[in-house]
Amino acid sequence: MVELRDDLRLALDRVEFARAVGIEPDDWQRDALRSAAPRQLYNCARQTGKSTVSAILATHTAIYEPGVLVLLISPTLRQSGELFRKCLEVYRAAQRLVPPDSETALTLALENGSRIVSLPGGKGHTIRGYSGVRLLVVDEASRVPDDLYISIRPFLATSAGRLVALSTPFGTRGWWWGAWKSAEPWERFMATAEQSPRIPAAFLEEERRSMGEWYFRQEYCGEFLDGQFSVFRGEDIDAAIRDDVPPLFSEAGGF
């Protein structure tokens, strides 16, 4: 449990904060929690603790940075509720170091002026209007549509806020795959199921047999794979594209 005399230590070290609320982070989780990178990607297998890390980051930010907004985006209402529940578990384990001002099904407001708001996705325009976001967490990022992702990035425009996106792969398409393979300055963290001390090897072997190699390699190994019925591999298509060949049509649409 949290001791108030250790409050400064917990404020300065998110790993120590995690331990104080009863969570011993894995190696990759410690690195992610202590990272100061403004843009992070968690390509992690199911049940390897990526949501837990996000909940620790969200709760720590709200407690120790007064007057900030922490925004959690998930593709569905159910997923929004699950991620928010993890944040509440961390907050309660921290003995509510900052008293709550109000609490709803998807929002926690603290007396220091900070808020954690968890929202389902859908069309981008349905969640417009937020600004000054200190921490933006995109859950199940491979399932978040490109237009929604583009619509939420401006939330960070004036706040010097952080963006954390977490997911398993979902084919070679979409902004999440593009971000993972791009040269942009994301800090990338990867954890396979075999690296998790909580997932038995026998379970993984059963999953491999049950779901097949294609699904298993994405859900548990973090691999971005082309569609099962694709005629051409994505890497072959990329290799066939050249920048030094003039376009067939002009920008005006003529020949």
Image: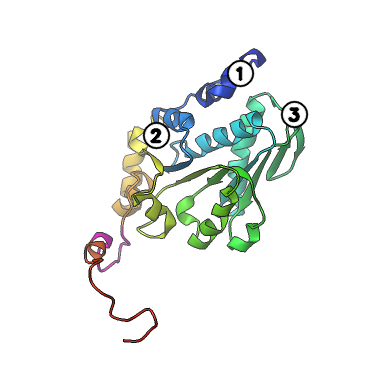
Q: Let me know if residue 239 appears in the view.
A: yes
Residue furthest toward the top? Answer: 5
Amino acid carrying mark 2 in the image: Ile
Q: Which mark is residue 199?
A: 2
Q: Is 62 contained in the magenta span? A: no
Identify the secondary structure beneath mark 3: loop
The x, y position of residue 41, in whole percent, is 43, 43
User: Which residue sits at x=43%, y=36%?
Assistant: 48
User: Which residue sits at x=57%, y=18%?
Assistant: 9
The x, y position of residue 147, in whole percent, is 52, 62
Figure quadrant of the N terminus: top right
The answer to which of 136 and 198 lies nearer the viewer is: 136
Crowding near pointer 3: few (<14 within 10 Å), some, many (20+)?
few
- The chief SS type of the magenta part is loop
* Residue identifier under label 3: 99
The x, y position of residue 236, in whole percent, is 22, 63
Figure quadrant of the C terminus: bottom left
In the figure, residue 28 lies in which quadrant?
top left
| Dot 3 and dot 2 residues touching (CB under 8 Å) | no
| Distance between mark 1 and mark 3 Cα atoms | 17 Å
The magenta region covers 226-235
* Residue identifier under label 1: 8
Crowding near pointer 2: few (<14 within 10 Å), some, many (20+)?
some
